[in-house]
Amino acid sequence: MVMLLSLWFVMSVRCLMMKTESKVKFGSKNKSFINVNKKLLIMSLKKSFFSIWNAFPMILAIVLLISLLNSYLGSFSISSIFSGIEIIDAFFANVVGSILAGSPITSYIIGGELLKSGVSLFVVTCFIVSWVTVGVVQFPAESVLLSKRFAITRNVFSFIFSFVVSLIVVVVVSLL
Amino acid sequence: MFFNLNLTLVFSKFISIFKSLIPVFFLMFVITFLISYFVKPKILVKYLGGNSGVKGYLIAVISGIISTGPIYMWYPLLSDLRETGMKDSLILVFLYNRAVKLPLVPLMAVYFGFKYTLVLLFVMIFVSVIQGLIFESFSFFGGIKNE
């Protein structure tokens, strides 16, 4: 389903952008309908393969790190780091959310449990947002593939804006 | 406490995560190939480059929301697009909007309520665009540039 959606999206973009290069005329002797540029096809295939191949070792390393973190998570209680002072708790929630990685479903489950144990919605939102936006585990791969400057900037922005998002969400939800 | 790890558990989690990535590798290969074959650099620069404007932000937001798989699987494709001319602020917007997971909305609503979930999603989309604009202004003022 996802593959079909992705294919549809790319083909739609292509159709919107493409000018009609060869029109099929009624009764034309030229029966060729699909014009395949073999050189471009081979070049695109090679480029796609090598872009994933070159990133493969980094992806393996990230998966291993996530496996280590997820295994360790079972023996570590996140709620033990919260003191009750909201601003400090929000900061620690952001730090922990930034370091931990994995499926967002895990963050919702942990967030739900934190909420039940008395942690404020602001702190829980900081945790969830930083989990999905900040990526300390992915940082090495991001800095190699997208430049160190970009990786640092994006993660710092995401860290700071997780406070902003949490504040706005909590205020809006309380007003509604 | 840190060294009290069950290595068998770590290895089995590694295998299970890696197995789930195999279809994503193929998906990434297909998407990278399609973009590389069909989308000419001039077109990419027009819609995602320096002067793309609102269209670029819209494409980045929507494609970030509908994208799937782990974030690190998108780095190779984004790196290629960046080399071709996609601006960094749109990459930032795309990566931030990846946090908006539409298939997980029902699950989030179960834990936190529908109202909270919707508000969070809309605020995240809005903040992603703000971040992109701030990032562009940094580049404009010569603060942060592509390497």
Image (cartoon, helix red, strand yellow):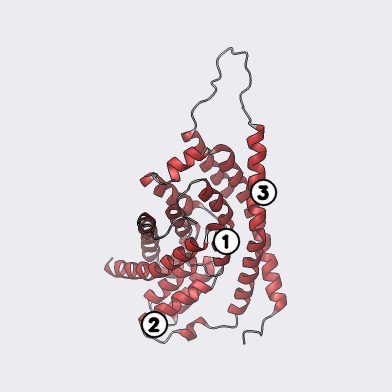
SS at mark 3 in the image: helix
Label of residue A83 in the image: none
Is residue B16 left or right of A118 when viewed as pictured? right
B117 or A155: nearer the viewer: A155
Marked residue chain, label 1: A
- Say which residue label 1 marks: A144
SS at mark 1 in the image: helix
B31 or A168: nearer the viewer: B31
Marked residue chain, label 2: A
The mark lying in front, picked from 3 and 2, is 3
Looking at the rendered structure, the kind of residue marked 2 is Ile
Looking at the rendered structure, the kind of residue marked 1 is Val
Residue drawn at x 67%, y 33% is: A38
The mark lying in front, picked from 2 and 1, is 1
Q: Callout 2: 10 Å neighbours few (<14), some, many (20+)?
A: some
Q: Position of residue B31 (x, y in %)?
A: 58, 46
Label 3 to label 2, Cα distance in Å?
A: 46 Å
Marked residue chain, label 3: A
- Say which residue label 2 marks: A88
Label 2 to label 1, Cα distance in Å?
A: 32 Å
Q: Are marks 2 and 1 on the same chain?
A: yes
| Image position of B45 with respect to B76: above or below | above
Counting residues from the N terminus, which is met first, the one under dot 3 or under dot 2?
A: 3
Residue drawn at x 35%, y 59% is: B134
Residue drawn at x 67%, y 62% is: A57
Counting residues from the N terminus, which is met first, the one under dot 3 or under dot 1?
A: 3
- Say which residue label 3 marks: A49
| Image position of B48 with respect to B132: above or below | above
Q: Are marks 3 and 2 on the same chain?
A: yes
